[in-house]
Image (cartoon, rainbow, N blue to C red):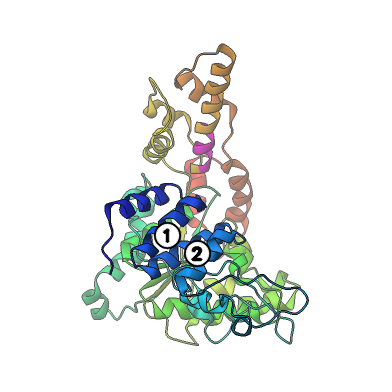
Amino acid sequence: MVEESPLIRSLRGAVAAAPEDVPLRLHLAEMLLAAGDGSAAVAEVAVALQHAPDDPEARALMARAVGGTSVPTPSLAEPSPPEAAGGFDWSRAEDEVADVVPPRFVTGSADEQGAPLRADGGEGGGGANDAEVWDVEAPGTVRLADVGGMREVKDRLEAAFLAPMRNPELRSLYGKSLRGGLLLYGPPGCGKTFMARAIAGELGAGFVNVSLSDVLDMWLGSSERNLRDIFAAARRNAPCVVFLDELDALGAKRSRVQHGGMRNTVNQLLTELDGVSGGNEGVFVLAATNHPWDVDTALRRPGRLDRTLLVLPPDEPAREAILRYHLRDRPIAGVDLTKLARRTDGFSGADLSHLCETASERALLDSVRTGEPRMIGMPDLLGAAKELRPSTEAWFAAARNVALYANEGGTYDDLLAHLKRRRLL
């Protein structure tokens, strides 16, 4: 390692501050080459060529840095190999800087059947090593304590799902398997995804977020293969939480699905939940849906997603915490969060975020009209609350009929109890 002079260190700092300044980077490369640090000079010139591929000074300096004598002028008529022309070997230079400069473009191709290929060479719809490409997030820092309010929901999670998983001795004593499935349902915008991440954090488990677009594929059999690879990655990284978002789309009732490929996808999901292709020990399956009545009933039988939890709009303490979060970086004055939380009964978390946006718009437009910026106050927030209607009302209107007339086996007893408390029946 060549010891760098103070001038070279200063030049490095200047280049770091202006990474796209090609002349400055070339000057640094000249200094490095003069100091005998050819490899560092090559790396700097290579980055310069990324920004200016046709710069003659950069090409000439690269030729000097890697030991060449001149840069060939390309001939369109009769190109000759670099060795024969005595010119610069760009292939050798590319090999030397391969560890420093990533490729500028990644090209794909198609196999003989027409299936698209990924940049790593595997088929787009799956393959022997496809389980390696699914990202398993490391155990997160979000805990249930970070979820504002919702004490009843947390207590039910602790009793039905978390306590058995946290106590291996008791689990072994009672023969409880280290696997499980939980279906979260409720109005949109009430934090089901955030709740799933909090559960993963409580378990200290990895997290795989699976949406419809991650699974469905236009090629026959690829959707099933994607599901198999997702669960294979989860088993390999156990303990792991697999979160199936919008389950009513991924696991729709097969009696209502006309496309055979979609029915096969549901069948594959059932197979993976049963752990037929590999034991699901240490794999916890969480799913979320706004329409549980559209989910295939086979997915909810014992051993699969056999526990159901209603996630309701945030209660008053939760609303106060959510409002505090969304107002934390805004200029506010004289805001009574307790009063505002009482006035937003029935609002979802998404509704509360929209309320804060609307109040900010009111203050901004007023500032534009008067030409003098002002703080966001309670009149802005209360005015926004009066203007907006809770988005959950439409969901409860539809869920009411299900709770009354399609509550087979008491599946929606908790929803029915909530509707009675709110006098919505």
Mark 1 — residue? 30
Q: Residues within 10 Å of mark 2 (few under 14, many from 20)?
A: many
Q: Residues within 10 Å of mark 1 (few under 14, many from 20)?
A: many
Q: Quadrant of the C terminus?
A: top right
Farthest right residue in view: 77
Q: Quadrant of the N terminus?
A: bottom left
Indicate the secondary structure of the residue bearing disc 1: helix
Residue kind at label 2, given as amino acid type: Leu
The answer for how far apart the CA atoms under marks 1 and 2 are is 8 Å
Residue 232 screen position, x and y as percent:
47, 81
Residue 224 screen position, x and y as percent:
61, 80
| Residue 359 or residue 92, whichever sits in front | 92
In the image, taking residue 286 as reference, residue 239 lies left or right, namely: left
Q: Residue at x 27, y 68 (%)?
A: 166
Residue 424 screen position, x and y as percent:
56, 41
Residue kind at label 1, given as amino acid type: Glu
Q: Residue at x 38, y 58 (%)?
A: 31
Mark 2 — residue? 61
**Magenta residue span:** 350-355
